[in-house]
Image: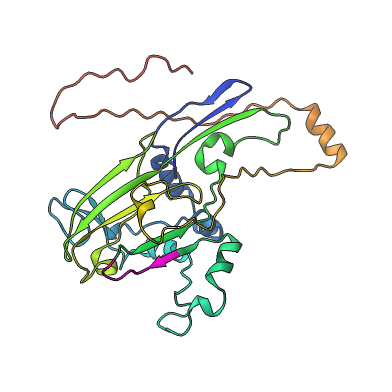
Amino acid sequence: MINSITVDLYGQSMVQQNQLIDIYTHFRLLTSKSWTTQNRWSTIGFYPDVVGTAGYDTANSIYAPANNTSNNGTLNLGLTKRLKYVLDYDGETLEWNSTSTLTNLISQTELGMLYVSHLSTKVDWGTTKSPVLQYSVRATIYLKDIHPLFEVMPISKSLNFKIQIFWNNAVVNATHNATNWTNQASQYRAYNGILPLLLNNVDDGFDSAPNGTLRASVCVGDTCHDSTQKGFTGVTTGAVGKQVELQVQAVQMLKEMENSYVLNHLRDVSYHNYYLFTLRNITGGESFNHLVSNAISN
């Protein structure tokens, strides 16, 4: 969800802006999380993909347009697990049991009041209007997962942080011909970034569907900001908050422990930073010169 972040402490830059940190963040999750941390994966919407289900082809396929990475949702356990984190009020609570829908336990309105991740709008207009699927996802993002600085911060007080976060708000158009994905194009707002959506294969979502174009977008908050989608009949305000909340853990220490901690208040904080430089429009075998940077110290 996050394209880049900057952090200042008392006016001193601690984390400089680098785009596409989500790629590095996802790599950290894949390489640092063990099965013992699985109890928090549903909180952050994480589950590793099965490598064997992804692919790339120079021709159109049922899984993806030509020259796009593909995903076989039928065999991808990670995708299946992540989909279960988002509740469908018409979905089965017992697999293959059509009478065990979630609506027998709780209504769509009550799901919205609980602020849980769920499918908040599902309208099939038949042949008259475009169908609408609107997901309201309660996304929890740990600061320590965004940047290593927050992972090593000691217990502190009276610190003056300035944190700026730039979100991946994007839109994609994807066309299918009832058999293959044939085309897709993404549009990014503000700070470029990526589209944090995974298009499933035709067998799982578009098998025998008529020719058409899918338009999907990601927005932070409860409002759809895509001008095209806002014109669709049925698009409503999502069942999540309007604002992003920053929650910081507060610790109350015993007096003697606090005094001892304060007397030894000097701490050396060592953390890893990273820099990303993109070299564009360079073909294979071509020679090039590029100044990476001349202003990075330490």
Q: Where residue 39 sits in the image (x, y, percent)? A: 56, 60
User: From which residue to which does the magenta span run?
Assistant: 121-128
Q: Is residue 35 in the magenta section?
A: no
Q: Quadrant of residue 142?
A: top right
Q: Where residue 153 sits in the image (x, y, percent)? A: 63, 35
Q: Where residue 93 sits in the image (x, y, percent)? A: 48, 77
Q: In front: 132, or 146?
A: 132
Q: Where residue 132 sits in the image (x, y, percent)? A: 36, 62
- Which residue corresponds to the image point at 22% horizontal and 69% vertical from the top-left? 209
Q: Quadrant of residue 285?
A: top left
* SS majority, magenta: loop
Question: Quick check: 169 above or below 42?
Answer: above
Question: Quick check: 167 above or below 297?
Answer: below
Q: Is residue 281 visible?
A: yes
Q: Is residue 197 visible?
A: no
- Which residue corresponds to the image point at 52% horizontal and 76% vertical from the top-left? 103
Q: In front: 94, or 234?
A: 234
Left or right of 173 on screen, residue 189 = right
- Which residue corresponds to the image point at 60% horizontal and 63% vertical from the top-left? 114
Q: Is residue 127 in the magenta section?
A: yes
- Which residue corresponds to the image point at 38% horizontal and 48% vertical from the top-left? 196
